[in-house]
Amino acid sequence: MHRVTLPSGLEVILSDTVGFISELPHELVAAFRATLEEVTGADLILHVRDIAHPDSEAQRQDVEVILDDLGLGEWLEDRVIQVLNKIDLLDVESRQVLGHRMARGNGQVLASALTGEGLPELLARAEANGVAGVVALEAEEVRRRVPMIASGVKSAILIPGEHVIDPWSAPLAYALQAIANGAALERNCEVVGGAFEDELWRLRTSRGMVSAEVVVNCAGLFGDIVDAIARPPPFRIAPRKGQFVVFDKSAAALVDTVILPVPSESTKGVLIAPTAFGNVLVGPTAEDQDDREKAAVDTATLKMLVARAAEIIPRLAGHPITAIYGGLRPATQFKDYQIEALPDRQWITVAGIRSTGLTGALGIGALVRRLYEKSFAGLKDIANPLWTPVPNLAETRPRPYQQGGSGEIVCHCEWVTLGEIEAAFEGPLPATSFGGLKRRTRCMMGRCQGFYCSWRIAQLAAGRLPLPLATGAAA
């Protein structure tokens, strides 16, 4: 998803989704449904059609049938612009017929990805629907900006204002600031039950009882289970897996911007983006599963991601891969986040926060504050809040190995110093696992994946972690 400030000054969010397949195989229905989660939250939908295909009308009907089956047909009626692509392949008579249809104002736009025809009209239509200001680029300008892009690129839409963030340090900084300003944080503390008596919650946890006047349930993948303590949950968490491929740092010379292809009738786009750590990332997928804790990766899907990346940036084909991984987000059966206050239960639910959790974190926090103040009591701002900066892991600013004074370099792939490793084990929220240590410092996350530095890191971590690296149980 991408935030865009358009020439008119309007700020919008752009997102792509999947292509549609007629007579979708049963085993793909769940995965297909998962890819549509962002569509249901959109203010405007662009349905891109191959108007030159002899079965174009049947394809349109297939899409509408699938949307109806998913319960989205009526909801989308006033939000769709049909983009009739490949008009360059039509004869004069066919184009005239379409032109007359357009004059009647039927919510369609003629376009050609090959020639760029119709793109200004599409942008104008988007502007009229409240989506304005993206910039159309000719193929020559696209190649100037991204020299390694596939030669078949025809045109593009520039989305200004995009940013890449370190996804680990931001939540760490939030937690550290909360602690510094008076919060208490318990880790490995499972909520297993509770009771609401005499205007007070008494929660049973794996580490004892916790009392609270108001409970905020933001339990992520277990949100519905925790919500059942207060009420029969009106939503169900359906873990949604996303698989990614991370290319070696040498790929950074090929890609310096986020690239998201336009979806077609039969294929979905694969995002290619630089990371804050100097790599190039490709993905994600969207696969529903039952397991709430494990996000396994599979060879076929990862090969698909690499192949799609190479179609966009050909020189990524055969390029070294540093890492593969999967993650889970807590989707529900609804298109929206499940955020509400239950005043009579002194409870606030914050659930179903999917892949935009980091992007929306501050806004969600502000909303929860408003709900709290409306339902329970006012909150006073901290007069002089303490700020808790975290170590810089991004390549866009100087890192400790460049500044000096942090001792030996322990991880040579990621240039992680002794001082950074030591610091990760200190403070009010020290690393308590090797996974946490990796995300605090980037150690063992480079080309060798810890092959050369894990022995030294195991020495430094000895006695500081519940599971020593030598057992093989803490990786």
Image (cartoon, grey):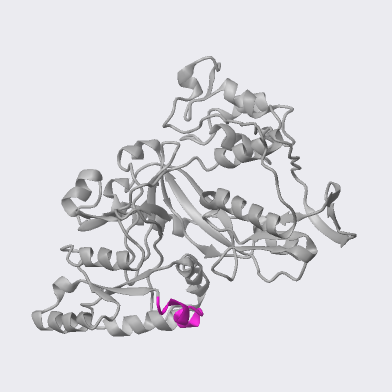
> Would residue 75 be visible to someone looking at this image?
yes
Residue 247 belongs to magenta span: no
Position of the N terminus, as image quadrant, is: bottom left
Residue 462: horizontal and vertical position, in percent?
A: 71, 27
Residue, x 52% and y 55% (percent of image)?
A: 356
Residue, x 20% and y 81% (percent of image)?
A: 103
Instruction: Please identify the quarter of the rendering in which residue 200 is found.
Output: bottom right
| Count of numbered marks | 0
Q: Left or right of 8: which side holds 449?
A: right
Residue 71 belongs to magenta span: yes
Residue 198: horizontal and vertical position, in percent?
A: 90, 60
Q: Left or right of 228: which side holds 126?
A: left
Residue toward you, 22 or 370: 370
Residue 165: horizontal and vertical position, in percent?
A: 47, 42
Residue toward you, 117 or 144: 117
- 418 in relation to 109, above or below: above
Q: Left or right of 431: which side holds 251?
A: left
Position of the C terminus, as image quadrant, is: top right
Residue toward you, 234 or 86: 234
Residue toward you, 211 or 369: 369
> Would residue 293 be visible to someone looking at this image?
no
Bounds of the magenta segment: 68-78
**Which residue is outermost to the right?**
198
Residue 318: horizontal and vertical position, in percent?
A: 33, 46
Instruction: Please identify the quarter of the rendering in which residue 455 is found.
Output: top right
